[in-house]
Amino acid sequence: MDTESTYSGYSYYSGRSRGSHRHGERSRDHHKSRSKDGSRSEKSVTINAPPAEPLLGDSSVLGEEVQDDNWGETTTAVTGTSEHSLSQEDIVRITKDLEDSVGLDCRRYFSLTLAVVLGLLVFLTPLAFLALPHLLWPDKLLVCGTACEGLFISVAFKLLILLLAVWALFFRAPRAGLPRVFVFRALLAVLVLLFVVSYWLFYGVRILDSQDENYQGIVQYAVSLVDALLFIHYLAIVLLELRQLQPAFSVCVTRSTDGETRHYNLGQLSIQRAALAIIENYYRDFSVHNPALLTASKSRAAKHLAGLKVYNVDGPENNAATGLAHSQSRAMIAAAARRRDTSHNELYYEEAEHERRVRKRKARLVVAVEEAFTHIKRMQEEEQKKAPGDVMDPREAAQAIFPSMARSLQKYLRTTRQQHCHSMESIQQHLAFCITNNMTPKAFLESYLTPGPTLQYGRERWLARQWTLVSEVSVTSGLKEGAIFLLKCIDFSLVVTAKRIPYIQLSEEFIDPKSHKFVLRLQSETSV
């Protein structure tokens, strides 16, 4: 009893002083960590957050749009600043985001300008070869015969084919902004530039200086230029499109947060182009990232792994009290160890209880949706008897029946921790879509009962404006055996491991068709 009273008195007075002291240290450490994070953000690549509706951590903002069914009332947000305030770190981040966006736009428009200038040079060069002799020395030129005029038609159609081919291959909307230049495309641009410059040098030395009178030879020279440009375009198709079609590597893509894994076959690609292909497949194949499930697992693990901390506050003066305290400490540590040993049972029963609640919420949701769709059919039968001006459109029908299922759907989404993935507006739009296309209740519920791919949800839920590619080797180098690189996003990263597809040796074994023939002999004495 004396020990307990001494402990309580000591913990009350010294605990308050130490608590206040620790609170001051905690606040200072928090301020230092925030300042360090701010300084680090200036040196690293900034990944911009989606600019639309907030995710789970900011779901309190959605509270202002709550309707009568109290949509999203359980989600809260804990922030260090108010909703309308900006810290110094936020200002630095916003400034860096603007600088990065301006730099990306400038680089994209600069490359587009170079491509347009090079294209104009390529297409105007053959026409200039044909027009300059008529402008500079028209009196000295020989008469162009029938063969020469036929070459004019050849040049015109070849230039038209080249124009369409270049438009189809190069002038396409960019899918993404890569950190480095595309090596093959840059090499082709340099090759075309050197090719055109060499033709101009030869034209200037042998035709312009001497004022060649053979106009048919000049036309044939222009035709040879167009033919060479067509062959370069064929080379571009092989290097840019056909070379990567044959699979050469099998890449394993793993999401760092939940471990979801997919495998893809890729061809001869550079690391940055392989990363682009992986991101495109990620939006199609991976389920949407749900940080709420990760938060629940972390809190459950922290609760089950929590132990007891025992402090000796009496000091070494009282040996008897110290021995008693040590014995009590050993008993408490043993009790904590036994509780850890039974934590798997608690986890099992907790997961079983969660599954039971999910099945219960699902049953209620299915019944509510079926009743709502039954009511829709009844309304449609009644509206067929009304005048055409009194018919309700699908949007109004969805708003009319949504309150009957909103409560059940809201509880189910909260139980499965999907409330941040579906807003009330998106659910009503999906309901109106199902009503318009005469879909069943099961088709309506499939989007909420089974987590779909990332593209199934709204862009504001998953769209990351910028990914960061982390690689030990140059991103312009090709994929190799054992290559590993990361694709970092806002909340997670994709770990990519490449392995070469092995060489497969097939052998043939011939089976003689006569070896399958056999004779069945029946004996007459056989008993029936």
Image: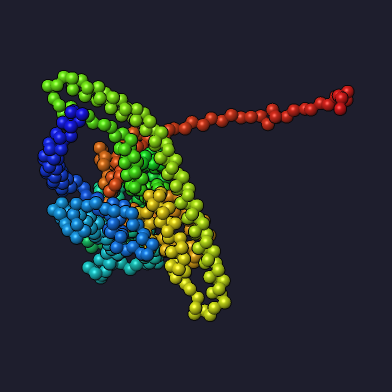
Q: Give the x, y percent position of residue 92.
A: 15, 53
Q: Is residue 55 visible?
A: no
Instruction: Find residue 508 and report its image quarter.
Output: top right
**For the point 26% across and 40% down, which residue is it?**
471
Q: Give the x, y percent position of residue 352.
A: 44, 40
**For the point 88% across and 23% down, which residue is it?**
525
**For the point 52% across and 67% down, which residue is it?**
376
Residue in the foreground of this view, choosing between 484 and 240: 484
Residue furthest to the right in view is 525
Locate the N terminus and report the quarter of the image it occupies.
Answer: top left
| Above/below status of 401 relative to 80 | below
Residue in the foreground of this view, choosing between 89 and 142: 89
**For the point 86% across and 27% down, which residue is it?**
528
Instruction: Find residue 90 and report its image quarter.
Output: bottom left
Q: Give the x, y percent position of residue 156.
A: 37, 65
Q: Give the x, y percent position of residue 166.
A: 35, 58
